[in-house]
Amino acid sequence: MARLSQSIRFCTTGDGTRIAFGTTGQGPALVRAAHFLTHLDFDLNSPVWGPWIAGLSRAHTLVRYDGRGCGLSDATDTPLTLDAWVSDLEAVVDAAGLARFALLGCSQGAAISLAYAARHPERVNALVMLGGYARGPLRRHPTPEQLKQARLMPDLIEIGWGQDNPAFRQVFTSLFIPGGSPEQVNWFNELERLSCPPAHAARTVAAFGQLDVCALAAQVACPTLVMHARGDARVPFEEGRHLASLIPGARFVPLDSRNHVLLQEEPAFAHGLAEIDAFLQAHPHVAASPGQFPSLTPGERELLELLAHGLDNLQIAAHLGLSEKTVRNKVSAVYTKLDVSTRAQAIVRARDAGFGQAELPR
């Protein structure tokens, strides 16, 4: 497999957390929501995630990011909540300039993706979930034994993951990739050590245990594909079925594997990737014609094109040979005609209508 290269950038969430995101490939945008245990740089050409990144980047611009406290993103002491994780995703797609895109949620990223799609239906044209769930282990009516195990896991992580001996980390690796080769197992053990400090990993697992987005699922309006491995040792197959049953019209595809992260060597990997490709090809984002804004004058269309490219008022003034005050007034008039109140909303509507795609004249 040829080595991939990526472009890594940073953005900042509303609470000041700096989030790292990377892009690979070319084509329509596909955003992978953050999940547990990621590291943009370490994952890229790895024996576990590398084949997934390469496969998804063949026909798409794949956007990945490290959630707060993980990988190249900022460490944080802020509470780990669904709202915080969704705000990470919101910051990334805005910084990447994505008006509309397909969204991929793996494992815990499925809940984050579902919540984002329910809250921002105008931004997501298709939703894919792999090995995901709508409710965390503590929200699944656990038996006393399951409850004890769920409460034990954070302590085991906090005590054991910081040690040089990988024995404690191996417990989790065996749940994620029980069918992994020695190379893949060793790499995953190291990922657990590198992705985030043990204390943060323990907080993350405890917080994921309390997730519950079941009430939001009925609000998802975009086409949705849910896939789950029958023998998934980390997230039970029944949780995948439950997730698919909550989303109106969702298509459910069982996969023959016992790995939570599908590995390149198993048939389920090719099956899953082919299902994603076919689904996204069947549900492309088709931008509307710029003619849908008939009330805009030619001058306002030109201004909207510059807005869609992300230029500020001073830069627009230089392009159009106008004063900054005049541009400010014209921008306000465009807001009124588009029925928006903020620059970000105007940019989203403009890009969704096809503005901002042509190269600007120098």
Image: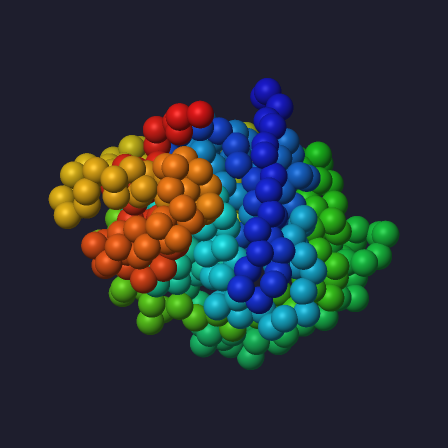
In the picture provided, is 354 more to the left or to the right than 289?
right
In this rendering, the answer to whether 187 lies above or below 246 is above
Q: Position of residue 11 (x, y in %)?
A: 57, 51
Snapshot quadrant of residue 97: top left
Farthest right residue in view: 164
Farthest bottom residue in view: 144
In this rendering, the answer to whether 145 lies above or below 63 is below
- In terms of depth relative to the viewer, which is nearer, 344 or 300? 300
Can see residue 44?
yes
Screen quadrant of the C terminus: top left
- In terms of depth relative to the viewer, which is nearer, 202 or 228? 202
Q: Position of residue 211 (x, y in %)?
A: 48, 69
Can see residue 310?
no
Q: Position of residue 263 (x, y in %)?
A: 55, 36
Farthest top residue in view: 2
Q: Residue visible at 15% across and 48% down?
A: 295
Q: Residue visible at 46% across and 46% down?
A: 314
Snapshot quadrant of residue 40: top right
- In terms of depth relative to the viewer, which is nearer, 167 or 19? 19
